[in-house]
């Protein structure tokens, strides 16, 4: 599934890395099998974590699950090495690639413009601006065409 959005991730400057507790040889076999059976090439590295050091450190092995299988996890780590998003999926549930792209878009938008994104935000939707620190700033927002519910809650188009 990640191969489908890989070009979009690249456009956003996102690096993708896979990790599993399987061996390098099993990864090679898996990559070859995927390509052979589906025609899809895996364009990103897949890291072997045989001793589970990384998987355990990041909470990828959950109680009650197989000791040799990690849950499906997505970590969005910013350029400053800060984990910004963690998504855990049971082995029985597929990941939503469009939601992962939306999260990345929201994080990049909020970082660039110093705003927040409301629930169900998509690129192009209005964003929430930080509350004003003075009465004058609050009044100025109305003049600038912000959509305000009250003095402290305003949205704008970027």
Image (cartoon, rainbow, N blue to C red):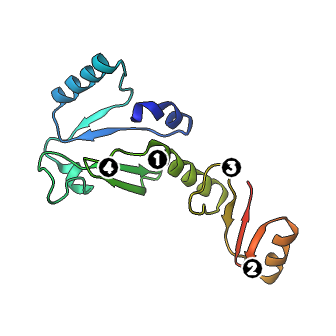
Report the Cα–Cα distance between label 4 and label 3.
Answer: 28 Å
Left or right: 134 with respect to 107? right
- Secondary structure at badge 2 equals loop
* Residue position for label 1: 100
Q: Tag 2 or tag 3, which sits nearer the N-term? A: 3
Give percent across and percent down for residue 22: 16, 37
Residue at horizontal 85%, vertical 65%?
144
Report the disc number at residue 73.
4
Sequence-earlier tag: 4 or 3: 4
Quarter location, residue 150 = bottom right
Q: Are marks 3 and 1 in contact (CB under 8 Å)?
A: no
- For marks 2 and 4, the one nearer the N-term is 4
> Considering the numbered disc 4 on the image, is that residue within a helix, a strand or a loop?
strand
Query: Mark 2 or mark 1, which has the lower sequence index?
Result: 1
Query: Residue 124: which disc?
Result: 3
Residue 86 image position (x, y, % from top left): 38, 56
- Mark 3 is surrounded, within 10 Å at the Cα level, by few (under 14), some (14 to 19) or many (20 or more) other residues, namely few
Counting residues from the start of the chain, the first of labels 3 and 1 encountered is 1
Residue under pointer 2: 151
Q: What SS does tag 3 mark?
A: loop
């Amino acid at each position: 599934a990640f191969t489908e959005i890989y070009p979009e991730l690249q456009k956003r400057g996102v690096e993708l890395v896979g990790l599993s507790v399987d061996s390098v040889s099993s990864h090679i076999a898996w990559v070859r099998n995927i390509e052979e059976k589906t025609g899809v090439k895996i364009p990103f590295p897949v890291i072997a974590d045989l001793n589970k050091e990384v998987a355990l450190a990041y909470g990828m092995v959950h109680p009650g699950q197989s000791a040799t299988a990690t849950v499906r996890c997505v970590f969005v780590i910013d350029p400053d090495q800060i984990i910004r998003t963690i998504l855990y999926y049971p082995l029985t549930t597929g990941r939503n690639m469009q939601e992962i792209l939306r999260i990345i878009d929201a994080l990049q938008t909020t970082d660039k413009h110093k705003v927040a994104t409301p629930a169900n935000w998509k690129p192009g939707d209005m964003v929430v601006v930080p509350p004003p620190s003075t009465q004058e700033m609050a009044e100025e927002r109305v003049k600038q065409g912000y959509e305000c519910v009250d003095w402290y809650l305003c949205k704008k188009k970027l």
